[in-house]
Amino acid sequence: MTPAANAAAPVDRRAPEESGAPIDCVLFDLDGVVYHGPEPISGAAEGINFLHDQSIPVNYVTNNATRTAEVVAEHISTLGIRTTPAEVTTSAQVLAGRLAERFGDGARIYLVGTTGLARALESEGLTLTRNLDDGPVAIAQGLDPNITYETIVRACEAITSGIEWWATNPDYSMVGPRSRVPGNGAFIDMLSKLTGAQPTVVGKPSPHMMEFAARRIGARRPLMVGDRLDTDIEGGNSAGFETVLVLTGVHDIHDALRASPGLRPTYILPSLRGLPKLIDAEDTHGTADGEHGSAGARIVDGELHLDDSAHLGAAIVEDALRLAWEAMDRGEDVAPGNLPRRIHD
């Protein structure tokens, strides 16, 4: 596991109705939440455009360091969700900002990456090099889909030279057209094994990325929405934000049940179509349809059981998860029982 920049232990979050402020910013992961590759996810445009209509700021936080914010914004806009580059935060931007803060204007940075990272570094006034003889002060590594054996060898030499090693994100794999394919984390792992070193990683699950995005907006009560517990939810929790696991991507309800405390979401949504209901309920400090705190779930002989009438309710599933987590934190084993893996709008 690579260290995360500004990593912090997950914080104990108060009950949503006790937070003292309405949700005033929503941060989104992209792949698995807003789209799958070039295709929009059903309900995403509906949910996000509701936020626009309510003048609730949004920001898209992506570990992808190969694309610029402009390219990402254009992609989202083609899905029927009007988006500006200022609403996009990439791990490349966060890494560039951290390096500029640490080393100052004009500092030489050894680049292992492609266009998105290069432009982010240059926009912060940093000087790029791929030559160790230029005396770089740090290595900035992001995914390079066209990486060569020679590039890997040079990266090993740069890391072994002892200069600081920074990386955009730890994502080990990505979804390709026919299979899972290597992500930046796979190359971090390889370089770590070759050199014995570890980089500082700024992308999710580091809280720094969420904090960076929320600070741009000036939010008091941000909400982080993602489909992965080990990046989106962990990162949001670590930043002290409430979090939503949306069931249109990688992880499902059973994954949430088994999650360690730092990876547990505040809310569950079948898709982003459910955002209006969640936001409206929290803005009035109420609960969706009166379901929270209902007796829709119980633990019997170590298994979680939901009433038959409760299967379609997100709030009932959330209550069931909280019931199970409390028992598990006391050292009990809790099996899923009839807890569904996914629910529908």
Image (tube, grey):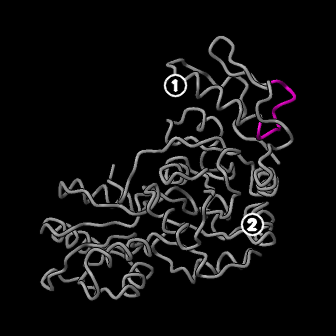
Residue at (79, 24) in percent of width and height: 295
Stretch in magenta:
307-315
Q: Quadrant of residue 254?
A: top right
Horizontal side of residue 202 vs 340, given as left or right: left
- Which residue bears the numbered disc 2? 48
Label of residue 254 in the image = none
Is 171 drawn above or below residue 137 in the view shown?
above
Q: What's the amino acid at mark 2?
A: Ile
Task: Report helix, strand or loop for mark 2.
Answer: helix
Outermost residue to the top: 301
Measured in 3D between alpha carbons, the distance from the residue under mark 1 to the one under mark 2, in whole angstroms, is: 35 Å
Residue 267 shows up from this direction: no
In the image, what residue occupies the spot 59% across and 77% down? 72
Q: Position of residue 132 (x, y in %)?
A: 16, 80
Q: Which residue is mark 1?
A: 329
Mark 1 vs mark 2: in front: 1
Relative to the observer, which residue lies in front, 182 or 91? 91
Q: Are marks 1 and 2 in contact (CB under 8 Å)?
A: no
User: Image check: 97 left or right of 210?
Assistant: left
Residue at the image point whose x is 64% and y is 52% from the top: 249
